[in-house]
Image (cartoon, grey):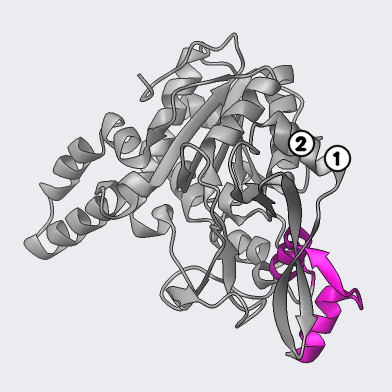
Amino acid sequence: MQRRIDKIFFKKKSIPVDLFLDKILYHKKLGYYQKKNPFGKKGDFITAPNISNVFSEMIAIWFVSFWENLNRPDRINFIELGPGNGDFSLSLINTLKRFPNLSKATKIYLYERSEKLIGIQKKKINSRKVSWVKNFDRINNGPVIFFGNEFLDALPIKQFKKVKNNIYEKHVSIKNKKINFILKKASKVNIKKLRNYKLLDDDGIIEYPVFGLKELDKVCSKIKKLNGGALFIDYGYYTKKNIDTLQSVFKHGFNDLSKNISNSDVTSLVNFDLYRKHFLLNDLYTEKIITQSEFLQKMGILERYKILSDKMNNKKKNDLYSRIQRLISPSMMGQTFKVIFTKNKKCKFSLAFR
C-alpha cells in the first residue's frame, strides 16, 4: 500500500485532486482501469448496456434516425467514448444488421485509454467495421456521432473551496501512510476559469472538470468540421450544487476514498449545465437536458418491452421488466441519469428532446 501511494505521488508532498485521480484511475501499472475489469457481478459496478440490451437498442434506433435526418450519407462515423466492456458496441453492430444501407455506411471507432479494457473489448467484438483509436485524427470523412455512456463521470475533476472571498484548491497529501485533503491558495488562472463559468457565486465546494473540458474540445472540433453531434448519458445534476460529489465504489458498494486506492472506482457527479455552457462556447447548439427516463420512453423502450415480452415465459418477462424499470424508474436510474445532446448548428435533428 505504502509503495503504491509513493509511486502515485512521485515524492511530491501533495498534488491537486484531478492529478491524484488521474494517477489512481489511469496510471499504466497502478491505475484502476488499467489492471482490472470493473464490470459485472465479479467487478465493482454495472452500466446500462450491461443491465439490458434494450438500452443499447434504443441508442441504435436513435442513431438510425440521426442518419436519416442527415439524408442518409454514404459514410458516417460512430465514435463511442469509453466503451467499457464492449457490450454496447456489440449490440449496435447487431442492430445495424437490420438496416443494411446504414450498416454499410457506418464506421465505428472505440475511444479507449485502458489497455486492459481494449483487450476485453477485442475479445468480444470481431468486426471489420470497428477500429480502436487514441485520438480522432483518422476521422476525416463523413459526419460524426459521438456517444458516451458514463464517460464524463469517470474523468478526473479539480476541486476548489470558496470561503467568503477566498478561493482554495484541494490537494491530496500523504501522511502516516494515509491520504489527506488539504487546501492551497488557488491560482489566478484557475480562478479566472471558474469565474468564466459563473461558479464563484456561492461558497462551498466547486468542482471543475479540466480533463472533461479538454476531451470535449476535441469532440466539438470534429463536429464543427465534419457535421454531426454528440450524445452523453451520465448521472449528475442540472445546476451547480457546491458540494463534494466524489464517490468511490468497490464490489458494488460505496467505499471510503482513502481505502482500496487504485483498486476501487472513483467518480463524480456531472454538472450538465457547465457542459452545456461549454458546448455553447464552442459554437454548438445544445438541446434541452432531459432525464434518462424521458429519453428512453420517448424512444419507445416500453413499446419494445411489450413486443419482446409477448414471446417470453413469465420468468423471463418479469426479469426483463425489472431491468427496464431499473433504467427508467425515478427511484433508480431514471431520474438520476441525465441526457445531453449537442450538435452542429446546421443540424435540425432533435428526436426525443422535444
280 to the left or right of 177: left
Q: Is residue 222 above or below residue 339?
A: above
> How would you rate the neighbour count of disc 1 (Cα within 10 Å): few for under 14, some for 14-19, many for 20 or more?
few
Q: Position of residue 202 (x, y in %)?
A: 58, 41
Of the 4 image quadrants, the one containing the N terminus is bottom right
Res. 75 in view: no
What secondary structure is the magenta-colored segment mainly? helix
Q: Position of residue 82 (x, y in %)?
A: 61, 51
Judge by depth and name the residue closer to the eye, 171 or 292.
171
Q: Residue 10 magenta-drawn? A: yes
Secondary structure at badge 2 equals helix
* Residue 88, disc: none
The vertical placement of 73 against 130, above or below, is: above
Question: Hey, which residue is sitting farthest right in the picture?
Answer: 11
Q: Position of residue 164 (x, y in %)?
A: 66, 47
Q: Answer with the quarter of the image where residue 79 lies.
A: top right
Disc on res. 189:
1
Q: Position of residue 188 (x, y in %)?
A: 86, 41
Which residues are drawn in magenta?
Answer: 2-28
Task: Identify the residue under disc 2.
Answer: 193
> In the picture shown, does residue 116 fall above or below 134?
below
Q: Residue at x 68, y 17 (%)?
A: 283
Is the C-beta separation of discs 1 and 2 under 8 Å?
Answer: yes
Residue type highlighted by circle 1: Val
Residue in front for this viewpoint, 201 or 8? 201
